[in-house]
Image: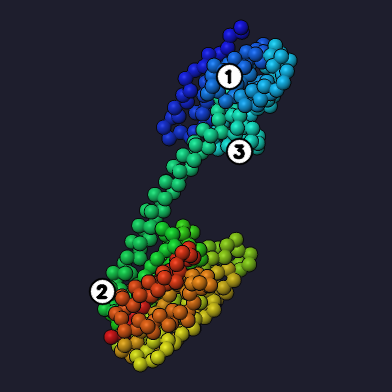
Amino acid sequence: MIPTVPLASPTRRPPARFAQPVAGDLALACVSVTPEHNNAQVFEIFGRHRELGSLPVLEDGRPIGLINRALFLSQIAKPFHKELFEKKSCIAFMDKQPLVVDAAVTVEQLALLTVESGEKALADGFLITEQGRFTGVGYGLDLMRVIAEQQAERNRHIMQSIDYASVIQRSMLGVSSAALQRRLGDACLVWEPRDTVGGDFYLFQDDADGWFAAVADCTGHGVPGAFLTLIAHAALKQALERHGPRDPALLMTEVSQAIKASLGQIDGAGSASNDGLDAAFLWFDAASSRLSFAGARTPLLLQEPGQAGVEIIDADRLGLGYADTPADARWTCRHIDLRPGAVLLACTDGLVDQIGGPKAIAFGRRRLREALVRHRELPMADLGAALMQELAGYQGSQLRRDDLTLFGFRLN
């Protein structure tokens, strides 16, 4: 009998720490045959090595084919095939075009090559070489396992980065949250990103004769939305330093121009991106109890004391910073004289657009107004919690569609 290459222990070459996995890491040393081996000898080898799924065929140490165990045994078991073929060369039943890869090929490249080769490379395996010489067999299951582990590791690093980005975003918002708690005794503030980070933000700034508040919904959610909140928040802070808080409409113009400049959206339709934000900017003058409001597609809900329903104070139908927003756009500043007991609410569309209910339709502003009427006597913190509880009940098993921010206060 012609000797075969002995079967080595099925252990892989340990990859270097932090190195990208390569095909060589999947190589399993195994018994092999040459064209001089006949099919009777191949039958014997498969009988002695029951763990062997495929048998490499080498010529001068270089792979020329691969014999699939199941296919070989099914062929040799056919009537008279053993008698006809057992003395013939093993190349009669070998795959003459197996997938052959160099040991230095990355597992990502290998995965693409395996897909391009079709199902046989996943089922039969692939031959791994160094400088053209056979080093071992790799199997599709092992390849999928390594790809899955690699993807899981990447996801872990990505989630660590996103988790830390959430810390940064929450720290940025925390300054405003603390200022609001110091200034307003009866207020509520809810910020719930759909993902770990979000595209909504709020800003609250205390002043000697009043306060300024902003609720904003930037394009997108998750990481892209969070990036845009950083740009928009910085633009608003700069506008406040430059012009002060008393003219919300002017601040909107400044923020819009800053967003357009930062994102290169000056040329309108010719811009590569079209991102911006919807927002409500509020200035409350403590001496006169007058509220100045500018809205970019974000209205206010107002319930005066003794009023049965809820009034909607409309916003302008023009977002801030978008490519199609004119560079010289101006927003309307509305002035509202508030009486003690008045309740005011501003929220992003993540609340009203949430799908739910038996008909799987949006929560809508009507349900929000009705809920506000039902809970109007509650302290604002409890009122905000009640609204969110009603939204959660309405949402049911539906997925959260968007980020959500809610700001409300009652004038004492």
**Residue at disc 3, secondary structure:** helix
**Closer to us: mark 2 or mark 1?**
1
Specify whether 145 is left or right of 203.
right
* Residue at x-position 47% and y-position 25%: 12
Query: Is any atom of residue 316 visible in this view?
Result: yes
Q: Is residue 275 above or below residue 56?
A: below
**Residue at disc 1, secondary structure:** helix
**Closer to us: mark 3 or mark 1?**
1
Q: Nearer the viewer, residue 64 or 245?
A: 64
* Residue at x-position 47% and y-position 81%: 366
Q: Earlier in the sequence, mark 2 or mark 1?
A: 1
Q: Is residue 335 above or below residue 233?
A: below
**Cα distance, mark 3 to mark 1?**
30 Å
Amino acid found under the numbered disc labelled 3:
Leu
Q: Position of residue 212 (x, y in %)?
A: 36, 77
Packing grade of label 1 (10 A; few <14, some 14-19, many >=20) is some
Q: Nearer the viewer, residue 337 or 351?
A: 351
Quadrant of image for the C terminus:
bottom left
**Cα distance, mark 3 to mark 2?**
58 Å
**Closer to us: mark 3 or mark 2?**
3
- Looking at this view, name the residue that lies furthest to the front: 79
Quarter of the rendering containing residue 183: bottom left
Amino acid found under the numbered disc labelled 2:
Arg
* Residue at x-position 31% and y-position 67%: 175
Amino acid found under the numbered disc labelled 1:
Phe
Q: Which residue is mark 1?
A: 46
Q: Earlier in the sequence, mark 3 or mark 2?
A: 3
Q: Position of residue 343 (x, y in %)?
A: 35, 84
Quadrant of image for the N terminus:
top right
Query: Is any atom of residue 61 visible in this view?
Result: no
Q: Which residue is mark 2?
A: 182
Q: Which residue is mark 3?
A: 112
